[in-house]
Image: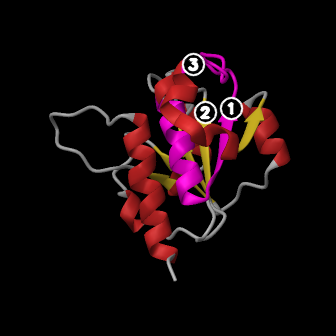
Amino acid sequence: MVKFNLVLVNPQIPNNTGAIGRLCVNAGATLHLIKPIAFDIDEKAVRRAGLDYWDKLDLKVWESIDEFFLQNDITDNAYFATTKTDRPYFEADFKENDYIFFGSETAGIPEEILNRYKSQNITIPMTKDGRSLNLAISTGIVLYDAIRQNFN
C-alpha cells in the first residue's frame, strides 16, 4: 500500500487521536502530532480508541509547528484540510508520501499556515446545515481517497 503522512495540529480529544492512530496503522500512514496536545498520549482514552494498535503506530511527536516545518520539507507535497475553502478534497492530486494536515477540533489549522499554502487548502463538502465533521471521520475520508488515487 502507498504511504502517506497525517498531521494533527494541536489535537484536543483523545478518542479522536486514538481512532486516527488506528486508522493510520491500518492504512500504513505515519501520524504526526504537533504540540501542544490537550491530553497525555498515554491516556487511557487514546489507548482505548486505538485498541491494541497503538504500539504498531508509526508516530512522530513534534514540540511545535515551527519545529515540524524546520524538520520537514513542505512544498507542493502537502494538503491542508479546512472549512475555509471551496476546493473539495477529491480535486487534490495526492502523491505517495504527501502530508495531509488537520487542525484541532475547535480551532482548525492556524490561519497563517492556511494562507501560506492557500492553493493546497482542501475541504470535505457538506450541507449548509453542518459546520464540520468529526476529526477522525474527516481524516478517514481524505486519507482513503488519497490511497484510492494511488492504489495499484
Q: Does the residue at mark 2 contact the one at mark 1 (Cβ under 8 Å)?
A: yes
Front position in the image: 97 or 43: 43
SS type, badge 3 = helix
Q: Which residue in the protein does label 2 denote?
A: 9
Which of the 4 quarters of the picture holds residue 29? bottom right
Q: Hey, what amino acid is under mark 3?
A: Lys
Q: Which region of the structure is painted magenta?
A: 16-44
Q: Position of residue 146 (x, y in %)?
A: 48, 65
Q: Badge 1: how crowded within 10 Å, few (<14), some, or many (20+)?
A: many
Q: Residue at x 70, y 25 (%)?
A: 35
- Say whether disc 2 or disc 3 marks the residue closer to the N-terminus: 2
In the image, is 16 to the left or to the right of 32?
left
Say which mark, if any, is on residue 44.
3
Q: Hey, what amino acid is under mark 2?
A: Val
Measure how far apart labels 2 and 3 are at the Cα level. Answer: 21 Å
- Residue 40 seen from this side: yes
Front position in the image: 146 or 79: 146
Q: Residue at x 71, y 42 (%)?
A: 59
Q: Position of residue 120 (x, y in %)?
A: 53, 56
Q: Hey, what amino acid is under mark 1?
A: Ile
Rendered view: 26 above or below 95: above
Q: Which residue in the protein does label 1 denote?
A: 34
Front position in the image: 123 or 35: 35
Q: Badge 3: how crowded within 10 Å, few (<14), some, or many (20+)?
A: some
Disc number lying in front (2 or 3): 3
